[in-house]
Amino acid sequence: GAGVSQSPRYKVAKRGQDVALRCDPISGHVSLFWYQQALGQGPEFLTYFQNEAQLDKSGLPSDRFFAERPEGSVSTLKIQRTQQEDSAVYLCASSPYRVSYNSPLHFGNGTRLTVT
Amino acid sequence: KQEVTQIPAALSVPEGENLVLNCSFTDSAIYNLQWFRQDPGKGLTSLLLIQSSQREQTSGRLNASLDKSSGRSTLYIAASQPGDSATYLCAVPFNQAGTALIFGKGTTLSVSS
């Protein structure tokens, strides 16, 4: 496809379950970002990859959150022992360049996670 | 710590009106400012990016201005249309490396026909 693809689109998890969210960036894009968007809020940065290297994970809210991009393309965001406060839309974005403050970002449609 | 605020939180206008959305930021040492559009259930689409050295950027019916010294940006939409209905967010880079953006909460615009 031409854009950033995220799956699943919707995920319902019971509190305490582990979840895995997938992001397929635009082919060849070097940079990949994960953001968390709670209802009625703006997106908040979680983590950034340049190819397979996770260069910034300062936004991950706890050690229950883990992200990887082992081959520098597809990325997975994993949340262990989900809590109700993890309910949000998780957005993935990619950029064709090594990131700078002027890098264009292409966002996916997100995965809406609901923890019951 | 940089904070980005957008007012109003929601706005309803009839078709054809010109309107202004506001964005303010607490730390004026920004590299640029972006305006995004988000449709329900969708990701974000970049509308305009203003460099810190610029005062304005225009794209079609959209015009964004930036006043770094006062920590403000405005997005002007001319002759609004129902298709403009969406949430509009502004964002600034967290650092020069640009590894993160700090977003406002957005303004949800509804344009009625």
Image (tube, coloured by chain):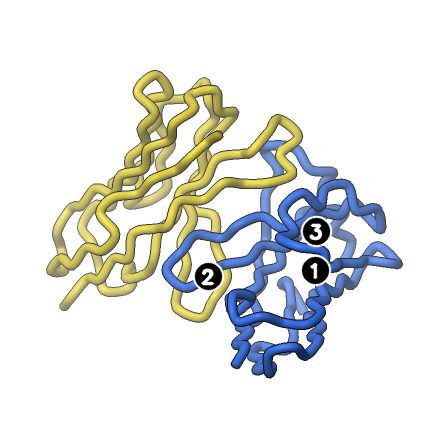
Which residue carries the number 1 mark?
Answer: A65
Q: Is residue A20 left or right of residue B85?
A: right
Callout 1: SS? strand
> Quadrant of residue A78 in the image?
bottom right
Which residue carries the number 3 mark?
Answer: A32
At 46% from the left and 22% from the top, the residue drawn is B52
Q: Which chain is blue?
A: A
Which residue carries the number 2 mark?
Answer: A38
Q: Position of residue A4 (x, y in %)?
A: 64, 63
Q: Position of residue A51 (x, y in %)?
A: 82, 48
At 71% from the left and 46% from the top, the residue drawn is A57
Q: Does label 1 lie on the same chain as label 3? A: yes
At 49% from the left and 53% from the top, the residue drawn is A43
Q: Position of residue B36 (x, y in %)?
A: 43, 48
Instruction: Kindly tell me whether residue A22 is visible in this rendering.
Output: no
Looking at the image, which is closer to me, A33 or A29? A33
Identified by mark 3, the residue type is: Leu
Quick one: quadrant of the C terminus of chain B?
A: bottom left
Identified by mark 2, the residue type is: Ala
Residue B9's mark?
none
Please tell me which of labels 3 and 1 falls first in the chain.
Answer: 3
Q: Chain of mark 3?
A: A
Distance of label 1 from label 2 (alpha carbons): 16 Å
Q: Residue furthest right?
A: A71
